[in-house]
Image (cartoon, rainbow, N blue to C red):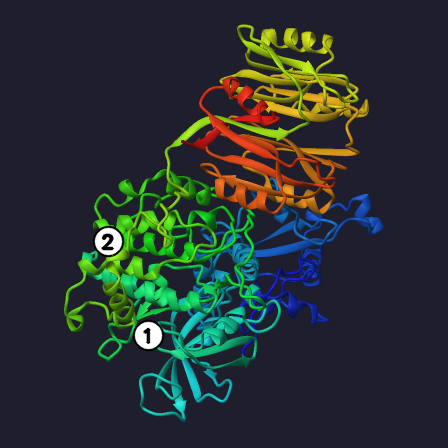
Amino acid sequence: MPELRSGVRRARASPVVDKKRGVSSPKAAAGKKRSEQLVGKYVKTRAAAATLVKVKQQKNPRRQTKQTKEEKEGLAPPTLVVVSETEERGKETVKEVRMGDSGGLSANKVTGQEEEGNTAPFPDRSPLCLHLLLLFERLHRQDVIKYKWFPVSIVELFESLNQSIDQLNTSVGTFFDPSLVGFQVQVGGSPQYKVERKLGKGGFGQVFVGRRVSGGTERISGPGAMEVALKFEHKNSKGCSYGPPYEWQVYNTLGGSHGVPKVHYKGKQGEYYVMVMDMLGPSLWDVWNSSGQSMSSEMVACIAVEALSILDKLHARGYVHGDVKPENFLLGQPSTSQEKKLFLVDLGLATKWRETANGQHVDYDQRPDMFRGTVRYASVHAHLGRTASRRDDLESLAYTLIFLHRGRLPWQGYQGDNKSFLVCKKKMATSPEMLCVFCPAPVRQFLEIVVNMKFDEEPNYSKLISLFEGLIGPNPAIRPINTDGAQKIICQVGQKRGRLNLDEDDDGQPSKKIRMGVPATQWISIYNARLPMKQRSVIPLIYFIFCGPLISKMGLWCIRYHYNVADARLSQHVERGNADGLLISCVSSCSNLWALIMDAGTGFSSQVYELSPFFLHKEWIMEQWEKNYYISSIAGANNGSSLVVMSKGTQYSQQSYKVSDSFPFKWINKKWREGFHVTSMATAGTRWGVVMSRNAGFSDQVVELDFLYPSEGIHRRWDNGYRITSTAATWDQAALILSVPRHKPGDETQETLRTSQFPSTHVKEKWAKNLYLACICYGRTVS
């Protein structure tokens, strides 16, 4: 098996040609003890080029270059001399490129670095560069062209492209070698196959047609088939980090489940892991594209019921597919008995929804930096980094059906590094009625059901299949898709159709809507339990004062709320509160006006604040850090200004903060590993500001991020002992930090409230439950 290039090339190696490839190879350079040159005397090594320059200088002393002091003493960094031919001038030109101390070309050094959490993958043009490089390599091997015909910049471009492609292969996990075509494969006791044309690529590997050259039978499918599908996965790809591909385990478990192709042989040959599977026919995307980019209602309905039967069997084995889309649904080979049979392929992203040991559903979690699937068809939960469950496959299937029927989805066309963000936002803002306006009613009903499923809810496949029964013809023999897999389920539905109600759960109770509602911009207020106390209230025009005696070590406990405070009056309210022994415990902003919570029970000894036109004024913050003040609360306004409150008497021992154009989860996750926890958050327009502190008093912490409001995630976290400790929101997203305190309070009761106006009228209602406002923000929710 020919060995492929992998990894990043070392810049220290001299560029020496690999005669088989016609491209410089550092590996070849490392093994050479003497200098060699490229074809056509195009690029020489330093020793050969220096000899050439010396000869020229002897012929023409006037052109002798002057050595610097560093060069004479041998301290100057090495130089790479590139000699190029120019056909128009008919003479050689010499160009020196000084190399950095690290050995890499200075021209290749990165001049800037993106913020952590926003690092973009390789540019979209990398696959085009790959094809260009492979084209020129192939032509060079066939002596059609020589590199000496091209300017030096083109060859240097090929060199850099070659390195970028190696990095891209390592990053994406897909290795491509044109020499695979024509190679012979035999693994796991299989017949010998000759690799022919390429069929496509999956999540981590590539699929080729393999034609049998020895052994086997004349069958078109099975272990001895004449033609098979060969899936190659390079040993250095991400899917093979710990040995054979993870996909092998999934296929072993499914073992020829309904609608899943069977793996006949598998093994390792050379640098590749190889799977031998049955050859299948066109994908649903191919059928859609060849049918005028549209499908009939009956065709879509047949696809729906058969796909549901396949997912039912797959889910019953404890797996979710994770990448349901038209390209992964294939029909059988044309002109065979299986040409109408539907198959689901590419299990490289499949994950378990059920624990193998105890059979319980996996635990809920959210990691906003993790995305698995295809952006166009992925569920919103996949976009938000939530743990995959059965509902995600069904939501992706709904988008697949709508695409096949309509020919387009509203979120197609987004480009750029924030593509996933924009697509997820659009998906959540598009109601089922708008998305399915040109689709049959069953498609809309199906979408409404699956987008409102709970994380661990078991799908009612019978109910879902029954939705499409009215669109399917009565004669199975003439249906465009074979629905044998769904026939048994359809019969079961017919026997109990009278009990099926789309608006009720299986227990007869009305189903709760998880993601239905109108996006809104509201106040999000969090209330924590405290010891009982008597209260009385005085209500001025623009703020509220609540105070009363409390039998505790603090004597008198007062809480004061201010809202709709303009910049000019901020200091007045703070001074009056300080005079009464109150300090700021929380701040927020709405419409460039401020809201304050002042509390006598903060435990702070002193406090300073700054109202700045900048979102988190770095110089002022660092100055206060030097005075042992720590950030206790922050707020940002739509105009970019900020209010930062710093206090003494906190339990923090170290702090760090970050301002980002997107929610900085990668940075937060990094700081978690360093022992920090989020203690304050705020937004200014679309920008996020997050403060993290050491010794914050938490044993664990998680994030709930959503484009509406993460009600389900909050309740699941509450059940596991988490409580909301920080919150912030933009016009697009709401983020809540939930923490587990090291020392549990006597009363862990916590409630949230979403209101269009500042929740002043709800405060006394919460007092009756001994709940007091702990933090508040204004931004995206759902009504």
Write the residue at 21% across / 50% down: 440
Front tag of 2 and 1: 2
Against 151, residue 753 (above or below) is above
543 vs 53, nearest the viewer: 543
> Farthest right residue?
73
Q: Which residue is mark 1?
A: 280
Quarter location, residue 725 = top right
Image x and y of residue 437, in percent: 23, 43
Kind of residue sitting beneath label 2: His
Q: Quadrant of residue 599?
A: top right
> Vertical placement of 47 versus 765: above or below?
below
- The amino acid marked with disc number 1 is Leu
Q: What x and y, as percent, mark residue 163?
A: 57, 59
Residue situated in front as seen by the camera: 371 or 195: 371
Say whether disc 2 or disc 1 marks the residue closer to the N-terminus. 1
Dot 1 crowding, Cα within 10 Å, few <14, some 14–19, many 20+: many
Does residue 175 appear in the picture of this structure?
yes
Provide the secondary structure element on which disc 2 rests: helix
Question: Which of 530 and 739 lies nearest the eye of the viewer?
Answer: 530
In this view, 119 is above or below 155: above
| Residue ID at (21%, 57%) | 295
Q: Nearer the viewer, residue 319 or 64?
A: 319
**Mark 2 → mark 1, Cα distance in angstroms:** 23 Å
Quadrant in the picture for residue 499: bottom left
Is 646 placed left or right of 433 in the picture? Answer: right
Q: Which residue is found at the position 56% from the left and 25% from the top?
A: 766
Residue 380 position within the rendered picture, expressed as x and y whole percent measured from the top left: 43, 47
Can residue 681 be seen from the camera position used here? no
Q: Which mark is residue 181?
A: none
Q: Quadrant of the C terminus?
A: top left
User: Mark 2 sits on what residue?
Assistant: 405
